[in-house]
Image: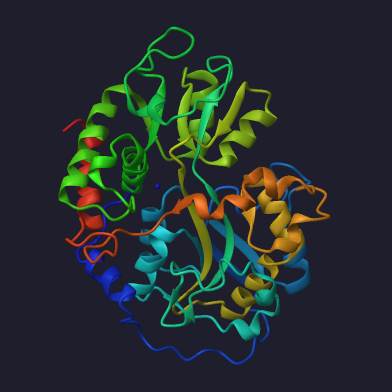
Amino acid sequence: MKSILRAGVAMLAMAAMNGAVLAQELPTAVGPGEGAVNIVAWVGYIERGESDPAYDWVTGFEKDTGCKVAVKTAATSDEMVTLMNTGGFDLVTASGDASLRLVAGKKVVPVNTDLIPSWKTVDDRLKDAPWFTVDGKHYGVPYQWGPNVLMYNTGVFKSAPTSWNVVFEKMDLPDGKSNEGRVQAYDGPIYMADAALYLKTKNPALGIKDPYELNETQYAAVLDLLKGQRALIGRYWHDATVQVDDFKTEGVVASGSWPYQVNTLVAGGAPIASTVPAEGATGWADTTMLAAGAAHPNCAYMWLEHSLQPAVQGAVAAWFGSVPVVPAACKGDPLLTDTGCATNGFDNFDKIAFWKTPTQQCKSEADQCVPYSRWVSDYIGVMGGQ
């Protein structure tokens, strides 16, 4: 959720959404593996048992295919875009606020789903999702999805907060102390959508329909809210591990977060829980996308198939706190358990405002909307106290 976009990104993303994509020749077969596959991924998405031996969906793949897996973790979608622009990777687990930028920038190519036998097992809600499907072509396969939750300290909040106002508005928390310096916000510009989602309920007169499609008046209100929030923020976070430490040792008691941090803290015995407040939540639906000019395309296709296996899907979901894209993983998995999908929000798909890249050409507003390039520059200013 941080790097500055290169000039023209918003225009390119808009072009992709309008179907201006390069025609691609799809492969017709998967050949012998090249011995390696290099992946850009979110933290916790590709584990080989180093953190916990029970969570390893890499070692078996390497033994079966001969494809050695190398992973570069990225903390934000913008970082993923930057890494893919640099090159040298075969796959990327891109969220919706990066995927169409990668398509527009011709950094990823369509995949032949006929070469991925487990494609037929993917949740029908995701198979043709607009964040990775352009002109009927699938630029990768779904991987995991879930909400951005409100993580909180149960020693401070005896019951779950019912509103995101605890991180947006100055107030005394249930322990009688101010929230100043005790809350966090994500340091990526896509976080502006969280503020917009909050204002959608708090100030309905603004007429916000889609938190990623804001006219100038709505956008100004979001900026004002975030500038006011600046005084409350102890630290803007993007590194999941650092946020975990902040909740342990730095007195942070509430923040938007990912289920991964919640799971990590709870497993360590910290007094932590999470909730989705009344205003709803933004969220992410991540796609494993194939890089243009990938050096190891056969190993990449093998990984795409491997990534959809129910055992892999269940393990990732149990580790990260996400929802599998293969419903079969929801039953019989020893790590996720039969209640894991419900716990992680399988039935909340329609309640999540999934990340996407804002563009000027928007559907919910008659006027043009504020493009992502403005979100980037203005949010940098907010974090800098401007």
In this rendering, the count of numbered labels is 0
Q: Where's residue 317, x and y in %?
A: 67, 51
Q: Where's residue 101, x and y in %?
A: 35, 66
Which residue shows up at 17% across the image and 42% down it? 220
- Between residues 368 and 322, which one lies in front from this camera angle? 368
Q: Where's residue 82, x and y in %?
A: 36, 59
- State which quadrant residue 319 falls in: top right
Q: Is residue 309 visible?
A: yes
Up/down of 325 relative to 334, above or below: below
Judging from the image, the colouring scheme is: rainbow
Q: Is residue 58 visible?
A: no
**Residue 52 placement, left or right of 114:** right
Which residue shows up at 49% across the image and 37% down it? 257
**Residue 270 placement, left or right of 285:** right
Which residue shows up at 41% across the image and 19% down it? 182
**Residue 110 placement, left or right of 267:** left
Which residue shows up at 39% across the image and 89% down it? 23
- In this view, which residue lies farthest toward the front? 205
- Between residues 95 and 76, which one lies in front from this camera angle? 95
Q: Where's residue 242, x and y in %?
A: 49, 33
Q: Quarter of the image containing the C terminus?
A: top left
- In this view, which residue lies farthest toward the top? 176
